Image: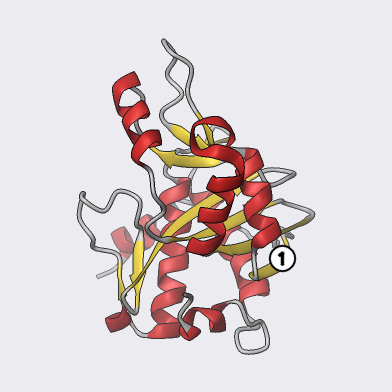
Amino acid sequence: MILEDIKSFFDIEKNPKIIKKLPEMFYLAELENRKKNKLSPDIGNTRERILISIFEELFGKENVNDDLGPVEKEVDVEILKERYSIKTLTSKKPKGVKAVWTVDEGSVKKFVKKYKPTCLIIYVHINWGEKGGIYLFDLNAQKKTIKKLGRDKNYFKIPKLDTNPRGVEFSKEAIDELIKLCNLKIEIDWNKPDINFDPKQRWKEIWNSD
């Protein structure tokens, strides 16, 4: 079941700013997390904070909780007690994203064998200069996809032994199937705004303030 409140986030008539502001905010995040023309691994956390800040504005800070502790590894935020995982990715086409950050063989096998979806997934496909979107994968869609693809076959992309891929991924096949089953989504033109950005400027302003 999807709470009515989250549907308002995906209703561009009620929330028209999302298609304009999100590309601007995500591009600024990239500028802040770029060094020597490469993105920092922290970019995912920054995008997550952007979305959570938007949720706080839409639903009230008292109804949004992102201080869930280390136990809730899959859950990034609770909105009105509903649990969500946030996944963001930049690519030409939607593709797989990290499901869990674990690499040793025992933990991987245990995760795949026991995995059951426990939260909704907000999947953001960023495609600079072209179209992408935001998708909400509900529990029913996740369960149907696992049943269709098989948890130990095509639903997950499992890391090869003796490598360091830093975790198990939802496969591209799984993401494609989840998008087919998705009822709540927003299409976004990911156009980069013209921003004159100096990552050191705000620290200079603090230094020079009284």
In this rendering, the count of numbered labels is 1
Q: Within the image, what quadrant is residue 191 found in?
A: bottom right
Task: Give 210 or 135, whichever is nearer the viewer.
Answer: 135
Above/below status of 144 relative to 9? above
Above/below status of 138 relative to 6? above
Q: Residue at x 45, y 81 (%)?
A: 3
Above/below status of 14 relative to 192? below
Q: Residue furthest right?
A: 130
Residue marked by disc 1? 188
Q: Residue at x 61, y 72 (%)?
A: 21
Residue 201 visible to the viewer: no
Residue 73 visible to the viewer: yes
Q: Residue furthest front?
A: 147
Q: Residue at x 36, y 27 (%)?
A: 109
Q: 105 left or right of 57?
A: left
Residue 106: horizontal and vertical position, in percent?
30, 22
Task: Give 203 or 55, whichever is nearer the viewer.
Answer: 55
Above/below status of 159 relative to 60? above
Count neighbours of disc 1 (C-alpha within 10 A) and say few if under 14, some if 14 to 19, many if 20 or more. Answer: many
Residue 129: horizontal and vertical position, in percent?
78, 53
Instruction: Name the secondary structure under disc 1.
Output: strand
Q: Amino acid at mark 1?
A: Ile
Residue 81: horizontal and vertical position, in percent?
31, 75
Residue 149: horizontal and vertical position, in percent?
60, 40
Q: How is the image coloured?
A: secondary structure
Q: 9 left or right of 77?
A: right
Q: Residue furthest bottom?
A: 14
Q: Quadrant of the C terminus?
A: bottom left
